[in-house]
Amino acid sequence: MMETLENETCYRALTARDRRFDGLFFVGVSTTGIYCRPVCTAKTPRQERCAFYRTAAEAEHAGFRACLLCRPELAPGSAPVDSVPRLVAAAVSRIEGGFLNESSLEELAAELGVTSRHLRRAMEAELGVSPVELAQSRRLALAKQLLQDTALPLAEVAFASGFQSVRRFNALFQERFGRPPSELRRASDGAEGSRSLVLRLDYRPPLDWEQLLHYLRGRAIPGVEYAGDSEYRRTVRLGGKTGWLVVRKDPKRPALLAEVSLSLAGVLMQVATRLRALFDLDAQPEVISECLGRDEFLAKCVQAHPGLRVLGAFDPFELTVRAILGQQVTVRAATTLSGRLVARFGEPVEGPHAEVSRLFPLPQTLAAASVDDVATLGMPGARARSLLAVARAVAEGSVRLDRHADVDGTMAALEALPGIGAWTAHYVAMRALRWPDAFPASDLGIRKALGGVTAKEAGARAEAWRPWRSYAAIHLWTSLSEGAGG
């Protein structure tokens, strides 16, 4: 997504060591004659010693030799064989989401477009562990948390953590921790019979929780989501299971606490992964603020909201539909339309919170609807056709709304659909694909915040904010008395 190489921009990404920029450029260091990937763990050189190149071949042509530590030949590229780090990142994301709990390594490799042998080698080279070992580690970590923080029976802890066998759970726990699971069990403190579990989700402070809730409050889909003064609620459909969750800020530590219905016990890994994406809990706020704070206008925004995050999407398809409904209408109107859509096509789900009682419709459900079915909700026929086109593309698999999907390819595929323009594509890239450098320059709110500039002028102004333009967009929307974005 870096159309032009600019030294200042590339150096910011280099100091962040953010894997989202791995493979987009390479840095040659004049004092060593070596070129590296931006995620290299070696000591960061001074900026004046760095030269930046689009490809490894360009760096070699300039006389630099490849780093033996970060191995530039393994940097992600356009072909699967060249995409080892990106491949590993995609595999780790799926494993952390519980893919290997019910599916095989061969199925995971096939979904990623490689052989299981290639995937195993790639992960061992990058992480030092095999896919199976990583999956076991994640299961044990979740089991340990459930043992300490809930009163679930040991057998239910095993299955909720992704183990298919209680015997295997006990044996592996004993092997890893040197004690049986029962020894980590805390007193139930009256939690026996509880209808929910609690997950702790740590983050790097600061995090502007109040502003995140404020942003969600105006955009929450009626029936599916609810954002109050101190918590976020929503319904959930994952892995054939349905339920609800509530997220609050931990008053004691930099973490969010997610109360999750017992009905979702078998998909807790997926729930945790999606919540981390929704609330952008893996961001590095100090690095981002340091970059954006150099701009005189944005410096005031960053100072006012130093922990502002780019909200992601618990359900990328849900977010994409919401973005389409938000085209050329106010936030309030888009929220009303989304509520009507859920009331018409969503399914009811039981739970203790009256505000969240319906599931967002599946892509297949909307794909089977007619233009008239959707248009009668109160939108133009053209927008109804756009919504159905996206639903069908996602249902058929021609568009993948996945944060490890190719960003440029996904945005191009979206813009090829009727009624989908650059604004929608960038908004989806920002929130559903989790791309930190998306920037919907034509957005009226962004242009207003910048003093009524044109889309072209907004885009030019944003060049100085790379590679964190998504965060700049959120700050600009937040600076308005009433947010106009998305």
Image (spheres, grey):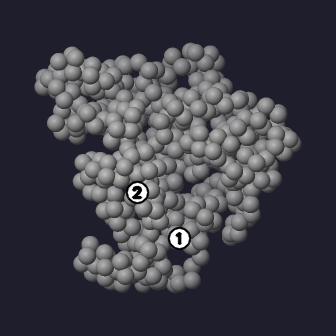
Between 51 and 404, the one nearer to me in the picture: 404
The reply to whether discs 1 and 2 touch (Cβ–Cβ < 8 Å) is: no
At horizontal 44% and vertical 65% (from top left) the residue drawn is: 101
Number of marks drawn: 2
At horizontal 14% and vertical 23% (from top left) the residue drawn is: 33
Disc 1, SS: helix
Residue 389, placed above or below residue 222: above
Please tell me how crowded label 1 is: few (under 14), some (14-19), or many (20+) other residues with Cα within 10 Å: many
Position of residue 309 measured from the top left corner of the image (x, y, whole percent): 50, 42
Disc 2, SS: helix
- Residue linked to disc 1: 265
What's under tag 1, amino acid-wise? Answer: Ala
Position of residue 128 measured from the top left corner of the image (x, y, whole percent): 24, 54
Between 42 and 81, the one nearer to me in the picture: 81
- Can the viewer see residue 258 in this picture? yes
At horizontal 46% and vertical 50% (from top left) the residue drawn is: 111
| Picture quadrant where residue 95 is located | bottom left
Residue 473, placed above or below residue 162: above
- Can the viewer see residue 377 in this picture? no
Q: How far apart are the two marked residues, 1 and 2, measured between alpha carbons?
A: 25 Å
| Picture quadrant where residue 484 is located | top right
At horizontal 36% and vertical 19% (from top left) the residue drawn is: 6
Position of residue 329 measured from the top left corner of the image (x, y, whole percent): 75, 33
- Residue linked to disc 2: 106
- In screen coordinates, is 478 left or right of 355? left
Residue 98, placed above or below residue 344: below
What's under tag 2, amino acid-wise? Answer: Glu
User: Which sits earlier in the primary sequence, circle 1 or circle 2?
Assistant: 2
